[in-house]
Amino acid sequence: MIAHYGYSDASGDWFLILDTDRCNGCGRCVEACPANIIEVGEDEIDPFREQPVAFIRHEERKKIRYHCAPCKPGNGQKTPPCAVVCDSGAISHSNSWKVCIQNNDP
Ligand code: SF4
Ligand code: SF4
């Protein structure tokens, strides 16, 4: 399943996309996230799944624009830490974010 967590602001739509089929619950993204908004636990989308999965903590979802803003390209990051450490390729970001990354490449 594909889970989208995001928001819109003056610079466009920003989504963190989590492919739960790829996630193995390793927890590396939890440790890497400077805002501490990722958790690994029971899959709320698929109650039959036994393996834990990463998700954005419920109480932080409406504040994701503030938490993730420092990871945006132009604020010192090319690829957000959560995506860098995910060897499974479970985490990606919206196209507008990728375009921004390309535009910031030297
Ligand atoms: S690093 Fe990737 S595979 Fe590991 S828990 Fe996070 S999303 Fe899942
Ligand atoms: S983009 Fe940054 S703040 Fe947002 S979940 Fe990923 S590492 Fe955490």
Image (spheres, rainbow, N blue to C red):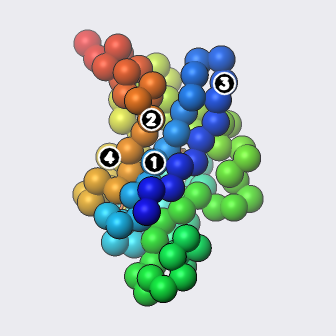
Secondary structure at numbered mark 2: loop
The disc, 1 or 3, on the residue closer to the chain's N-terminal end is: 3
The disc, 1 or 4, on the residue closer to the chain's N-terminal end is: 1
Residue 1 can be seen in this image: yes
* Residue hosting label 2: 94
Question: Which residue is pictured at 44% across the width and 82% down the height?
Answer: 49
Q: Position of residue 10 (x, y in %)?
A: 65, 17
Secondary structure at numbered mark 1: strand
Question: Which residue is pictured at 31% across the width and 19% down the height?
Answer: 102
Above or below 106: residue 5: below
Q: CA distance from mark 2 to mark 4?
A: 15 Å
What mark, if any, has residue 9 been given in the picture? 3
**Could you tell me the amino acid type at mark 3?**
Asp
What mark, if any, has residue 50 been given in the picture? none
* Residue hosting label 1: 17
Q: Quadrant of ligand 1?
A: bottom left
